[in-house]
Image: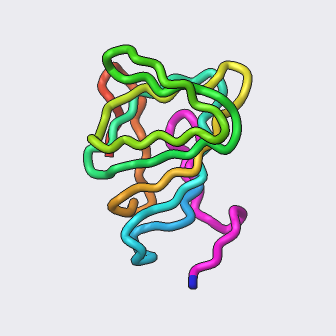
């Protein structure tokens, strides 16, 4: 059995927020579990070429924007899944951080970070 507290997990600054990584590849579960904070007022062009991701909002508000411009409101109780390695914009409300519980498959190694410079999606 694996038991971890938020205060004890690996925290990674990913560009526009923090990713607190509860489960990693080394844990042998086959997926990762993170508690992710997206800073208020940020807009991040993201893509996971090597992972599928599902996110469940537990605090704050924001949007996920498809590359075709379709906006999907995100608020507590809403889940979104990137089931096709979808490039997307993750947008946090200007007045409050967005907090997501995320699952990645396959599992993250642990040190992955986004590079948010330029107009190319950050990916890992």
Furthest residue toward front: 77
Return the x and y of residue 84 as percentages of the image width and height: 27, 41
Magenta residues? 2-19
Residue 18 seen anywhere in this rendered image of the structure:
no
Please say if 33 is above or below 99. Answer: below
At 57% from the left and 85% from the top, the residue drawn is: 1
Q: Nearer the viewer, residue 85 or 124?
A: 85
Please say if 120 is above or below 54. Answer: above
Residue 46 seen anywhere in this rendered image of the structure:
yes
At 41% from the left and 52% from the top, the residue drawn is: 112
Q: Is residue 40 left or right of residue 111?
A: right
* Residue 47 belongs to magenta span: no
Return the x and y of residue 45 as percentages of the image width and height: 40, 27
At 73% from the left and 21% from the top, the residue drawn is: 95
Return the x and y of residue 31 as percentages of the image width and height: 40, 65
Q: Is residue 13 left or right of residue 94?
A: left
Q: Nearer the viewer, residue 83 or 106?
A: 83
Q: Is residue 75 left or right of residue 113?
A: right
Instruction: State how the image is colored.
Output: rainbow
* Residue 13 belongs to magenta span: yes
Please say if 80 is above or below 121. Answer: below
At 56% from the left and 49% from the top, the residue drawn is: 19
Say which quarter of the image contains residue 75.
top right
Q: How many marks?
A: 0
Furthest residue toward top: 69
Return the x and y of residue 102 as percentages of the image width and height: 51, 51
């Amino acid at each position: 059995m694996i038991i971890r507290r938020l205060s004890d997990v690996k925290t990674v600054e990913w560009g526009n927020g923090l990713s607190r990584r509860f489960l990693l590849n080394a844990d042998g579960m086959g997926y990762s579990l993170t508690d992710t904070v997206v800073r208020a007022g940020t807009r991040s062009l993201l893509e996971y070429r090597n992972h599928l991701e599902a996110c469940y909002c537990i605090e704050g508000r924001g949007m996920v924007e498809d590359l075709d411009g379709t906006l999907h409101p995100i608020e507590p109780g809403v889940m979104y899944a990137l089931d096709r390695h979808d490039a997307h914009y993750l947008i946090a409300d200007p007045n409050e951080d967005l907090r997501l519980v995320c699952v990645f498959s396959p599992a993250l190694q642990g040190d992955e970070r986004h590079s948010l410079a330029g107009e190319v999606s950050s990916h890992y």
